[in-house]
Image: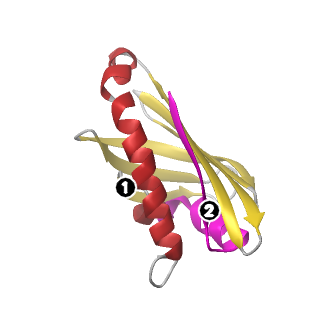
Amino acid sequence: MHVERTFTVSRSVEDVFDYLSDFENTNHWDPGTIQTRRTGGDGGIGTTYANRSSFAGREVELTYETIGFDRPTFFSARGTNRQSTATDTMTFTRDGDRTQIHYRADFQFRGIVKYLAPLVVKPKLAALADETVEHIRGALEGEGGLA
């Protein structure tokens, strides 16, 4: 199951990449994130993060690892726990002095959650994706920019 959105922000591709590829910044732009902190690495491939998020009234913890990093055009991180895997993938395209962002989040569930997810999770994903876009825009273009 996945959601994806494509949108444009008024920031340079380098600024956008640098901000969104530092996954600790999910604290500012991911509406479900309660806290993300870097646990290892230099920000590139193999960097790990501990993430605590809330979704559908439940708190979950995921360990994320940067699995794709090609500045300033591509970033991907995969988060795992016993019940699920979440992969966030972003591509960045220069559009003059603006940046087009293509954001895709893929979710895989295990155990009983695999059977419940289409009924419980899927209906909430579109709204969450729209909210995420607004939070990213706000973080990148809001007053003061780059939170």
Residue 139: percent from left, percent from top: 47, 70
Element carrying mark 2: strand
Q: Is residue 12 visible?
A: yes
Residue 8 image label: 2
Q: Is residue 14 magenta?
A: yes
Element carrying mark 1: loop
Q: Magenta span covers which residues? A: 1-25
N-terminal label among 2 and 1: 2
Drawn side of residue 130 relative to residue 72, left or right: left
Q: Amino acid at mark 1?
A: Pro
> Vertically, is 12 above or below 43?
below
Residue 124: percent from left, percent from top: 34, 36
Residue 1: percent from left, percent from top: 50, 27
At 40% from the left edge and 18% from the top edge, which residue is drawn? 114
At 27% from the left edge and 38% from the top edge, which residue is drawn? 56
> Vertically, is 67 above or below 42?
above
> Vertically, is 67 above or below 110?
below
Residue 31 image label: 1
Residue contact at pointers 2 and 1, CB within 8 angstroms: no
Q: Amino acid at mark 2?
A: Thr
Q: Nearer the viewer, mark 2 or mark 1?
A: 2
Q: Is residue 72 visible?
A: no
Drawn side of residue 59 relative to residue 136, left or right: left
Q: Check disc 1: other Cα within 10 Å, few if <14, some if 14-19, many if 20+.
A: some
Residue 38: percent from left, percent from top: 51, 60
At 75% from the left edge and 59% from the top edge, which residue is drawn? 93
Residue 84 image label: none
Q: How far apart are the alpha carbons under marks 2 and 1? A: 19 Å
In which quarter of the view is residue 89 placed? Answer: top right
Instruction: In the displayed orientation, state which residue is furthest to the bottom.
Output: 144
